Image: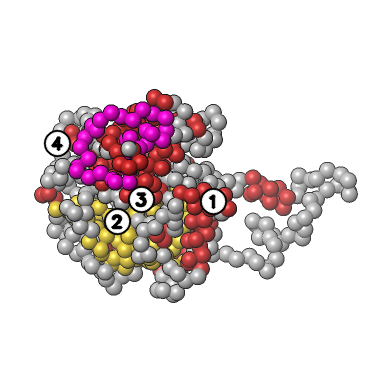
């Protein structure tokens, strides 16, 4: 496969065109005599409506743009493959995680979250890390980020959060003073954001290269084995080159000179044969241990500390081929957390559950109707047989006489429930319909503190610098004070150091102990 061709590439060949050299035609295949001069009445007369080439050329151009993604609009993609090295046969029936002889084609899209399609790569932001595995059992999409937690616990807040992150409606100035106001206002009023804000203010938010970035599935998912036994799982990607960031000062300079820095780097690495590689790791939690942690496994603002559940490396992904057409592939690819294969299932994480609705819903408008799974980059290599019919952009000519289940006319109505079919894990749930989660969802600080305490002194200085720079741009003093008050729950030294840099009175006393650890560098700075 390395340098060779896989089944996905062979499938894509069916749609590849390269019109160079041959004669120009219209969409109807009619050879064109002149594409520089429109048909007119005499040398000085009006252009004629009957010029079908003029009309077609301009109409197609007029319709070139589609809506950019509502989030993660800026991205870069690459093809590659995945191989499992340590089979998970005891835990899942997903073949691509069990059979070491299989090479599974993948397409990965890395992205920033907040900026628009043409925005700079080097901004402080979360990075998306979305992988489509074209498995023989159908597509599995691992739609993750480069940070292991998220800003909010429940998807019902996602529109609020994204509205707070995106430019303000009136000015549409990204990263303007006022945009800082809305994000920090959201943060101070929704302290569940605190753990993620620590990651966002750290150097993780300015990766040096997409090939040097970790990825996380964030949510707790479920693996299910052949006996139907479930195991909770967190997915991790680890870059073989190690995790490296830019320095803040570098991002400022590079952003000016080469806003496509990460995109160019990914492209160049692949063209040069220095293929980005990532190790897939899993944290496995037996079903009976569901309640043994001090937090809820369904809370996406919490990690499972690796000291408690180590990450087990299970496979390796190599990205070895750039797309041929950015729009056709990287722009039209449609990841969906709901694309799972037999042996991988969901949990009741309320953020995950909302995502299950959101991705398909948005893609129906972004990609123009229900047939976008037929777009080459989205097609599974597994066979597709169903009774769907019609819709905008239907590309298939399904000759079956009957489009319903059951039928006896088409001589081969697709069977259901056969071996290998997806069966939802039969989790038993019981409870009243309420709008409330476990009490531990209210603990917004202890893992933020854990993160802070895991940082080296120089990393802490970078975090303080980032808070000062970003929060310091917030015009409203009461918002700056509100965020500092939350930081005082995370770490007193941190809160004091940030307060001093942004014109806010340092908080008088620690709200929680510093777990016996204080940073000498910061204590000095605060003295
Ligand atoms: C897009 C990750 C939470 C809605 C994306 C993409 C990634 C991602 C990587 C870009 C996919 C691509 O490259 O095409 C995540 C992660 C989340 C999260 C890791 C939390 C753990 C949410 C939530 C919602 C949501 C809670 C909504 C309730 C969307 C939408 C898109 C998107 C609408 C655009 C999809 C498209 O147009 O194709 N997300 N997201 N995300 N996400 Fe999320």
**For discs 3 and 2, the disc positioned in front in the rendered view:** 3
Residue 347 coordinates in the image, percent (x, y):
23, 45
**Residue count near mark 1 (Cα–Cα under 10 Å), binned few <14, some 14–19, many ≥20:** few
Foreground residue among 152 and 483:
483
- Are discs 1 and 2 less than 8 Å apart at CB? no
- Are discs 3 and 4 less than 8 Å apart at CB? no
Q: Is residue 207 visible?
A: yes
Q: Is residue 132 visible?
A: no
The quadrant the C terminus occupies is: top left
**Label 1 sits on residue:** 253
**Residue count near mark 4 (Cα–Cα under 10 Å), binned few <14, some 14–19, many ≥20:** few
**Residue count near mark 2 (Cα–Cα under 10 Å), binned few <14, some 14–19, many ≥20:** many
**Label 4 sits on residue:** 430
- Of the numbered discs 3 and 4, the one sitting upstream in the chain is 4
- Of the numbered discs 1 and 2, the one sitting upstream in the chain is 2
Q: Image quarter for residue 506?
A: top left
**Residue count near mark 3 (Cα–Cα under 10 Å), binned few <14, some 14–19, many ≥20:** few
- Of the numbered discs 4 and 1, the one sitting upstream in the chain is 1
- Of the numbered discs 2 and 4, the one sitting upstream in the chain is 2
**For discs 1 and 2, the disc positioned in front in the rendered view:** 1
- Of the numbered discs 3 and 2, the one sitting upstream in the chain is 2
Residue 429 coordinates in the image, percent (x, y):
15, 39
Q: What label does residue 458 carry, if any?
A: 3
């Amino acid at each position: 496969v390395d340098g060779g061709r896989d089944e996905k590439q062979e499938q894509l060949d069916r749609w590849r065109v390269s019109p160079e050299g041959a004669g120009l035609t219209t969409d109807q295949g009619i050879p064109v005599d002149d594409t520089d001069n429109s048909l007119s009445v005499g040398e000085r007369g009006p252009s004629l409506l009957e010029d079908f080439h003029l009309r077609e050329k301009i109409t197609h151009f007029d319709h070139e743009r589609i809506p950019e993604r509502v989030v993660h609009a800026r991205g870069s993609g690459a093809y590659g493959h995945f191989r499992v090295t340590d089979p998970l046969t005891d835990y899942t029936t997903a073949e691509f995680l069990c059979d070491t002889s299989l090479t599974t084609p993948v397409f990965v899209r890395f992205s920033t979250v907040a900026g628009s399609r043409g925005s700079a790569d080097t901004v402080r932001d979360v990075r998306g890390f979305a992988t489509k595995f074209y498995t023989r059992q159908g597509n599995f999409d691992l739609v993750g980020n480069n940070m292991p937690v998220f800003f909010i616990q429940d998807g019902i807040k996602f529109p609020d959060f994204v509205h707070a992150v995106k430019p303000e409606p009136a000015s549409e100035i990204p990263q303007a003073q006022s945009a800082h106001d809305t994000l920090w206002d959201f943060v101070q009023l929704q302290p569940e954001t605190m753990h993620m804000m620590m990651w966002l203010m750290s150097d993780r938010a300015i990766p040096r290269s997409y090939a040097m970035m970790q990825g996380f599935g964030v949510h707790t998912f479920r693996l299910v084995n052949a006996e139907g036994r479930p195991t909770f799982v967190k997915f991790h990607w680890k870059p073989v080159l190690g995790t490296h960031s830019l320095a803040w000062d570098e991002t400022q300079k590079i952003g000016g000179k080469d806003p496509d820095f990460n995109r160019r780097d990914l492209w160049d690495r692949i063209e040069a044969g220095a293929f980005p590689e990532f190790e897939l790791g899993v944290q496995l939690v037996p079903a009976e241990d569901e309640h043994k942690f001090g937090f809820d496994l369904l809370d996406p603002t919490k990690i499972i500390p690796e000291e408690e559940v180590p990450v087990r490396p299970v496979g390796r992904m190599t990205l070895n081929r750039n797309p041929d057409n950015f729009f056709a592939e990287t722009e039209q690819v449609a990841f969906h957390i709901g694309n799972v294969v037999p042996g991988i299932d969901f949990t009741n994480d309320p953020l995950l559950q909302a995502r299950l609705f959101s991705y398909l819903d948005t893609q129906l408008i972004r990609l123009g109707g229900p047939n976008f799974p037929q777009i080459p980059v989205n097609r599974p290599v597994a066979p597709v047989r169903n009774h769907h019919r019609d819709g905008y952009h239907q590309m298939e000519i399904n000759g079956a006489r009957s489009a319903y289940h059951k039928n006896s006319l088409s001589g081969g109505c697709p069977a259901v429930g056969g071996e290998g079919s997806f069966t939802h894990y039969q989790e038993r749930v019981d409870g009243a319909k309420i709008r409330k989660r476990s009490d531990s969802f209210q603990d917004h600080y202890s893992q933020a503190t854990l993160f802070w305490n895991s940082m080296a002194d120089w990393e802490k200085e970078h975090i303080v610098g980032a808070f000062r720079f970003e929060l310091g741009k917030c015009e409203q003093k009461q918002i700056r004070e509100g965020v500092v008050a939350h930081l005082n729950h995370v770490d007193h030294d941190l809160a004091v150091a940030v307060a001093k840099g942004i014109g806010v009175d340092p908080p008088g006393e620690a709200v929680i102990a510093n777990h016996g650890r204080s940073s000498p560098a910061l204590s000095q700075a605060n003295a």
